[in-house]
Image (cartoon, rainbow, N blue to C red):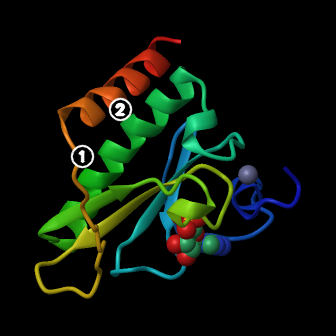
Amino acid sequence: MSDCIFCKIVSGEIGASKVYEDKYTLAFLDINPVNKGHVLVIPKKHFDTVLDMPEDEGVALAKASVKVGKAVRKATNCEGINLLHNIGKAAGQLVFHAHVHLIPRFSHDSMRLGWDRKQYANSAEQEEFRKKVSEAVGK
Ligand code: AMP
Ligand code: ZN
């Protein structure tokens, strides 16, 4: 994808603070970190989101994310990490080249996920969603 900023990082057309690379993936510092040491792990091939990736590419991305996640923890002495994919505009995705965020977290940092939890109206409604999702997995 010629107009994709992360493809340009893979090709070397634009620079990045690289921290890890293997056959399938590349990891570099996020240019606007939520906390210092915030890393993005991306597939070298272009996919709009992680849900568009074939299984072997997804496995390679997951493996690299675990490896680099351990390194981020060691390097930053963080107390936790948010491993996040933003999939789609509604979920906050701005760059449409699949990527995993590894965000080092500290008890009193300023990041807020702001989850507003809902409840199912009743067990029948919960069962309706369980069925819908499990049937979709099977397809
Ligand atoms: P998302 O909202 O999940 O699509 O996040 C995209 C991330 O890419 C943001 O956290 C940006 O700060 C980061 N980003 C955008 N351009 C660059 C770049 N050239 N180098 C490093 N990180 C970038
Ligand atoms: Zn791309």
Real-space CA distance between mark 1 and mark 2, rounded to the nearest whole angstrom: 9 Å
Question: Residue 128 location, x and y as percent?
Answer: 34, 28
Question: Residue 32 location, x and y as percent?
Answer: 51, 82
Question: Residue 17 location, x and y as percent?
Answer: 54, 70
Identify whether 27 is placed above or below 134: below
Q: Which one is earlier in the sequence, the residue at label 1 or at label 2? A: 1
Q: Do the residues labelled 1 and 2 touch (CB within 8 Å)?
A: yes
Q: Which label belongs to residue 129?
A: 2
10 Å crowding of disc 1: few (<14), some (14-19), many (20+): few
Which residue occupies 75% across, 60% down? 12
Tag 1 residue: 120
Which residue occupies 28% across, 68% down? 116
Q: For disc 2, does the CB lie below 8 Å from ligand 1?
A: no
Identify whether 116 is placed above or below 68: below
| Mark 2: amino acid | Phe
**Seen in the image, is 52 located left or right of residue 63?**
right
Element assignment for label 1: loop
Which residue occupies 33% across, 55% down? 83
Q: Which label belongs to residue 71?
A: none
| Mark 1: amino acid | Tyr
